[in-house]
Amino acid sequence: MKLIQKEELVFVRLLLPLILGIVSAMVLPPVSFAIQAAFLMSLLLFLGIWFCVILYNEFKIYLHRGKLGSLVQLFIFFIGMALTLNKNQLDTPSHFSIFKNEALIVSINSEPKLNGDILRFEGSVEQGLIHNSFIPQSGSLLVALKLQDSSHQYYYGDELLLPGSYKEIEPPYNPYEFDYKSFLANKGIFHQVFTDESQISVLPGRHSNIIIEQALAFRKNLVEKFDRYINDKEAASVASTLILGYKAELSPQVLSTYSKTGTMHVLSVSGMHVAIVFIILGRLLWFMDRSKNLRI
């Protein structure tokens, strides 16, 4: 039986400080000072690691690999802490919930999903209207928009002017019920707004990440091809979910069937999917194992 060398457990050794950083951030209050301190420590540790890599032979860093490994683990720890604290901006001075806003300027930061005549998406608050003045603000919220004109479409990056009325996400009220509030809280979302299409305005300009925008457009193009070449609509929706992670077209009947049979997990990206992709890539790139440089 082949023994596992410690060099083969590199991801486990990096995972532990990442988990500790995330847990530490969940215990700490989400104040801006803690976020800035965590990012500053991450930057200093990154510069220290980069310095060690550049001068690896000159200063014989290879004689102190344990110390270099400790620097890497500390860097991963503070990165995990900083990213987790940055997700929870509820108590930051610029969060929109602190202000009494008459209206909000919100940019769509997720792909809108249509269910009947209700369009749902996640939005990032850019500004708030207070006494006829727009003030820069931050935070995210869940938007449910009741459509009146089905021909009018909304896209990732669109900026909308929404009413300033919103409410907190409600917690579960029944035992063993899915905790949707905690699920959204882990994404930095604590509030939601339900409004009618007649109460909003689409503003000129866009606020989007070009990489995400192009990725969503590419996925939408592939979903349309699935719909075109797969005659069975339900089969096409399941294929889009399994291969592309696009769940908007899944019917309630299909979701109910997978839920009752206990196979809902296959509709989400899981370790099995990652393993299949890993094996396929390994087979396709077999020739790179012949050279030491290519192997790295």
Image (tube, rainbow, N blue to C red):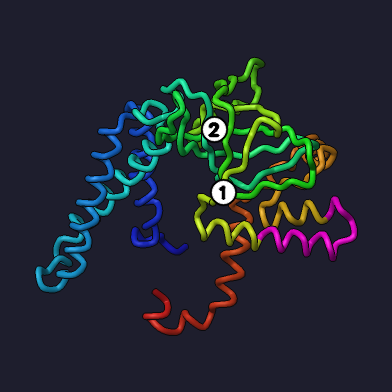
Magenta-colored span: 219-235
Mark 1 residue crowding within 10 angstroms, few (<14) / some (14–19) / many (20+): few
Asked if residue 83 lies left or right of residue 275, the reply is: left
Q: Amino acid at mark 2?
A: Leu
The image shows residue 132 at horizontal and vertical percentages of 46, 27
Asked if residue 38 lies left or right of residue 162, the reply is: left
Whether the magenta-drawn stretch holds residue 145 is answered as no
Q: Amino acid at mark 1?
A: Pro
Up-down relation of residue 253 to residue 7 (above or below): above
The residue under the point 73% across, 32% down is 146
The residue under the point 22% across, 45% down is 41
Total tally of numbered discs in the picture = 2
Which corner quadrant of the image does residue 26 belong to? top left
Look at the numbered disc 1 and give the secondary structure of its residue.
Answer: strand
The residue under the point 62% across, 38% down is 201
Main structural element of the magenta stretch: helix, strand or loop?
A: helix
Which corner quadrant of the image does residue 58 belong to? bottom left
Up-down relation of residue 173 to residue 18 (above or below): above
**Label 1 sits on residue:** 204
Distance of mark 2 from mark 1, alpha carbons?
21 Å
Look at the numbered disc 2 and give the secondary structure of its residue.
Answer: strand
Q: Which mark is residue 141?
A: 2
If the image is split into quadrants, where does the C terminus sit?
bottom left
